[in-house]
Image (spheres, grey):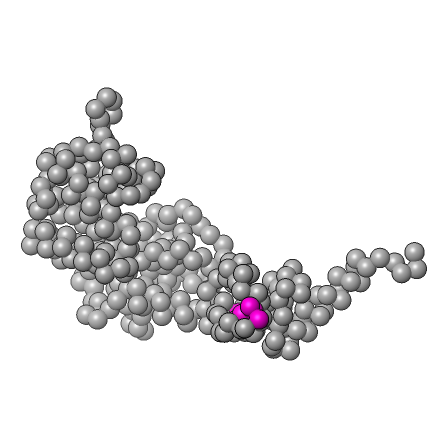
Amino acid sequence: MRADRLVAILLLMQSRGRVTAAEVAAELEVSVATARRDLEALSTAGVPVYPQAGRGGGWSLVGGARTDLTGLTATEARALFVLAGPAAGGTPQVRSALRKLVRALPETFRPDAEAAADAVVVDPTGWGARDRARPVLVDRLEDAVVRRRRITMEYAGRGPGRTRREVDPWGLVDKDGVWYLIAGTDRGQRTFRVDRISAAEVTDLPAHRPADFDLSREWDRVVGEMEQRRSPVTATLLIAERLLPVLRDHFGRHCETLETRADGRVRVRVAAHLARSIAETLAGWGATVEVLEPDVVRAELARLGAELVALYEPDRGA
C-alpha cells in the first residue's frame, strides 16, 4: 500500500540523511520505478523532499526534518496526508501507520492532517469513457474539503442550463480519472461530477459534515446504487472455470460466481443494462458459454446467430 511506503520513505531519509531511488527500492522491496514515483510524488505535493543531481546525489529532506516530523510545516503535513489518504482504507497496517504519523505531528497540525487523509478516495474501476486530465478545480475543492468550508458553484446537470448551488463539500473521488464531489445540500447528500462544475468559490462559512461520515463507505453505497440502475438485466451462465478470469475482464464488478460444479464448470451471474448487451458480449464466446437464463438473453443470442449464419453461410447451391 502506498501510505505505508510514503511513511517508510520519510523515516528512511531521516535516518540516512540522503537516499537514492535504488536504495529505497531495495529497502521497501519495490521496483526502482515505483520508488522514484513515490519520491517524486512527495516532492511534487509539497513535502520537503528534494533531489540532488550528480555524483553522490540522491534524495533528502530539506531542513533536516526529524523523525517526530516537527520539521514539516502545516502545508507540508497536509500535502503528505492527501497523498497517503487514498490508501488508508486498506490493510490494518496502513491505517496503523497513518495513526502513528498523525500522533507524530505537532498538535496544531493534526486536525488538518486527519481531514486531508479522508478527503479523497481512489476507485480504479471505470464507468466507460475516461477523462484522464485532472480537472483544474480539484485542488480548490480539495482545499474546501480539508478546511471544512462551504463552496458556491455553477453546475451543469442533466437538464438545460446551469444552476448556482451552495454546498458542504464532504469528499472527492477519483474514479479511474473521472472525479466526483460528494457534498451535503439542502436536499441531502448529493454526488456531482467535477467536470460539470464550471466555477467554484470557497467561502468563509463553515461546512457541516456528519460526525459518522465515512467517504469510502459512502462511495461504495453510491457505486452500488449506480450499478443497480445501470445493470437491471442479469443472466446466469455456465463456463469453464479456467475461462472465468477472462469473463470477469469483460463484465467487471457485474460478474458474480455462484457455484463451482463437479464437471469443472462454474455457474456465474452477469449483468448489463440490456439483454442485448449481454448477448452481444457473449456472442464471441460461441459454445464455450451456456446461458441458462433468462429466455430473453437466449433469444437475443439466437437472433445474433441467425444473422451471422444468413450473412456468412456459404451458398448451398454453389
Which quadrant: the C terminus? bottom right
Q: Position of residue 300 (x, y in %)?
A: 67, 70
Residue lying at the far front of the rendered structure = 262
- Above or below — where is 214 with respect to 144? below
Q: Could you say which quadrant of the image residue 194 lies in?
A: bottom left
Lateral position of residue 303 relative to residue 148, left or right: right
Q: Nearer the viewer, residue 45 or 52?
A: 52
Q: Position of residue 234 (x, y in %)?
A: 54, 74
Name the residue: 89% across, 60% down. 316
Lateral position of residue 99 relative to residue 131, left or right: left
Q: Is residue 259 magenta?
A: no
Q: Nearer the viewer, residue 247 or 146?
A: 247
Q: Position of residue 128 (x, y in %)?
A: 50, 57
Q: Main secondary structure of the magenta part?
A: strand
Q: Is residue 269 magenta?
A: yes
Lateral position of residue 227 relative to residue 112, left or right: right
Q: Could you say which quadrant of the image residue 169 lies in?
A: bottom left
Q: Which residues are magenta?
A: 263-270
Q: Could you say which quadrant of the image residue 115 lies in?
A: bottom left
Name the residue: 44% across, 61% down. 161
Lateral position of residue 82 relative to residue 293, left or right: left
Q: Nearer the viewer, residue 162 or 94?
A: 94
- Does the rendering let one see residue 250? no
